Amino acid sequence: MSAEEAALPAAGSPSVTELTPPAERPAPPDAVAEARATPLAPAAEPSPPPTPVPAASAPEPVAALPAAVSQPREFVSVQDRAVELLAAMNAARADAGLAPLTWDPDLAAVALARARDLIEHGYFDHYGPDGRSAFSELAARGIRYGLAGENLARNNYAEAKTVQAAFQGLMGSPGHRANILEPRFSRVGIAAVRSGRVWLYVTIFAD
């Protein structure tokens, strides 16, 4: 790959997929993964936030995690898992002949704010109970872009497998894959958050 390696921070509607753990490595019986992707959304002029364009693929039904797995609502951000997911996405982009996504700390802050809102208000969708979204968060922070998208994924796999489970689910779904392999996207911010037994991944893409 001739493109420069994506710059990483210093250490310190939607379609859904479900995954089950490999048979040879038993996991808790409620182990499940799910993900959601927004379609690409152009920037609004000048505000309000852009309205997402319907995805090209037909949406698949949403499979919810068991209620017992969705608690508690406190969370811990795990930067290494975010970096690992970015590396997986950039490897897929390299295989497709695309330039890597570059880590953007402003987009990462949006992703973390979205993760916090999802957990604190107990939902898993691109629009909160108050109607706020990644796009309104981008607008509120004055982040400029021409095109943006959001991928959501969550699972209760062990830490050693959680990123791969999320990535496989995202790449196995047309809406998520389209965001990951969108040639116009060049910047990304990822929040990888653990809340109880659940791992939540929020990825914000922009051009």
Image: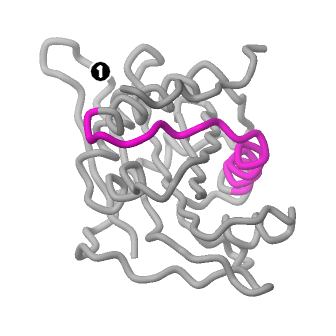
Residue 81 in the image: x percent, y percent? 55, 24
Label 1 secondary element: loop
Residue 195 visible in this rendered orientation of the protein: no
Which part of the image, by quadrant, shows the C terminus?
A: bottom right
Residue 205 in the image: x percent, y percent? 57, 54
* Residue found 64% across the figure and 81% down from its top: 50
The stretch in magenta equals: 95-117
Magenta part, dominant SS: helix
Judge whether residue 113 is colored magenta. Answer: yes
Note whether 12 is above or below 98 in the view shown: above
Which part of the image, by quadrant, shows the N terminus?
A: top left
Task: In the displayed orientation, state which residue is furthest to the left.
Answer: 23
Amino acid type, mark 1: Ala
* Residue found 26% across the figure and 34% down from its top: 95
The local crowd at label 1, few if under 14, some if 14 to 19, many if 20 or more residues have their Cα within 10 Å, is some
Give the image quarter of residue 195. top right
Residue 182 in the image: x percent, y percent? 40, 56
137 or 66: nearer the viewer:
137
Note whether 186 is above or below 174 in the view shown: above
105 left or right of 19?
A: right
Task: In the displayed orientation, state which residue is furthest to the front.
Answer: 2
114 left or right of 186?
A: right
Residue 125 in the image: x percent, y percent? 53, 65
Task: In the displayed orientation, state which residue is furthest to the right.
Answer: 141
Note whether 49 is above or below 185 in the view shown: below
* Residue found 80% across the figure and 71% down from its top: 139
Number of labelled discs?
1
- Residue beneath disc 1: 27
